[in-house]
Structure formats: structure tokens, C-alpha cells
Amino acid sequence: MAIERIPTDPDAGIPDLIRQLGDDSKRLVADEVRLAKLEMKESVQRAGTGAVQLAVAFGIGVVMLVALTIFLATLIGRIAAGHMWVGALVTGLIELAVAVVLLRRGMGVLREPSYTLEETRAALKDTAVWARSQRS
């Protein structure tokens, strides 16, 4: 692999070199902004696709849970000598118990340390202290 040399004029003065550096910097910033826009567009498209898939999955899950609730209430009602109200009551109590268990688990997760990147912030503080000590 050959290294491409950038042609430079040996007779160029400091103002010309500074102007060339400014032009190169502007081009580099413009390229970075263009790249950021492309990456953002791709990320938004991917997020939109994921959101649609999650919405469809949620809708299918709700329909499935309603069907399961009706099935369970009917099954328990038939077992209870045809008293469908018993099946509905037992099914409601089972679903309430499951909801309480899931709610307690969720609240337990939320009580854990925050999601504000505490370890990352601590590492950044350590890095800042190190950089200050190296400067001194």
C-alpha cells in the first residue's frame, strides 16, 4: 500500500499555509456534519421500524391475553358445575395476583441505583484529576 503525499508548495508563506489550514478545517467540519446527519437519519429510521414492531407485538399480546382470560374463565366455570361467574372471579383474582407480583418486581428494579451513568461520571472525574496533575 503506497502512501499518498499531499503536494505542498515549498515557497508558500505562513499566510497561505494558514489559509489552507482554515479551508481544510472548514471542509472537515462540513464532512463531519454531513456524516452526523446521515447517521442520525439511519438511527431514526431504525428506531421507527423498531417502534412499529413493538406496537404490533403489544397489540398481538393484548389480544392473546384477552383470549387467554376468556378461555381460563370458561374452563374454571365449566369445572365449577357451569357457574361461569366463579370462573370469571377466580381468573380475575389470579390476574390481580400476577399484576401485584410484577408491580413489586418493577418497583424493586426502580429502587436500584439510578441509570445516570454513575460509574462513567466517576471515571471522568478520575480522568480530570489525573489530567490536572499531569498539567501541573
Image: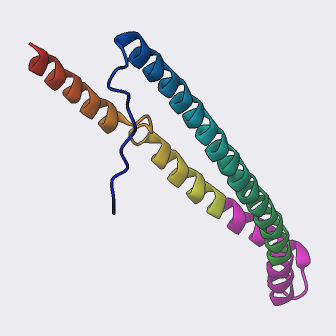
Q: Was residue 28 drawn as part of the magenta stretch in this picture?
A: no
Residue 42 sits above or below residue 123 on the image: below
Front residue of 127/31: it is: 31
Tell me: 110 left or right of 77: left
- At 36% from the left and 14% from the top, the residue drawn is 13
Q: Give the magenta range.
A: 70-96
Magenta region, mostly helix, strand or loop? helix
Residue ID at (41%, 10%):
15
Question: Which quadrant would residue 52 be assigned to in this image?
Answer: bottom right
Q: Is residue 86 visible?
A: no
In the foreground, 41 or 108: 41
- Reply above or below: 87 against 37: below
- Whether residue 21 is situated above or below residue 94 in the rendered picture: above
- Quadrant location of the C terminus in the rendered image: top left
**Residue at image x 46%, y 47%?**
108
In percent of width and height, residue 2 lies at 33, 59
Quadrant housing the N terminus: bottom left
Q: Residue furthest front?
A: 11
Q: Identify the residue at horizontal 35%, vertical 12% (top origin).
A: 14
Question: In the rendered image of this protein, does residue 50 appear above or below residue 34?
Answer: below
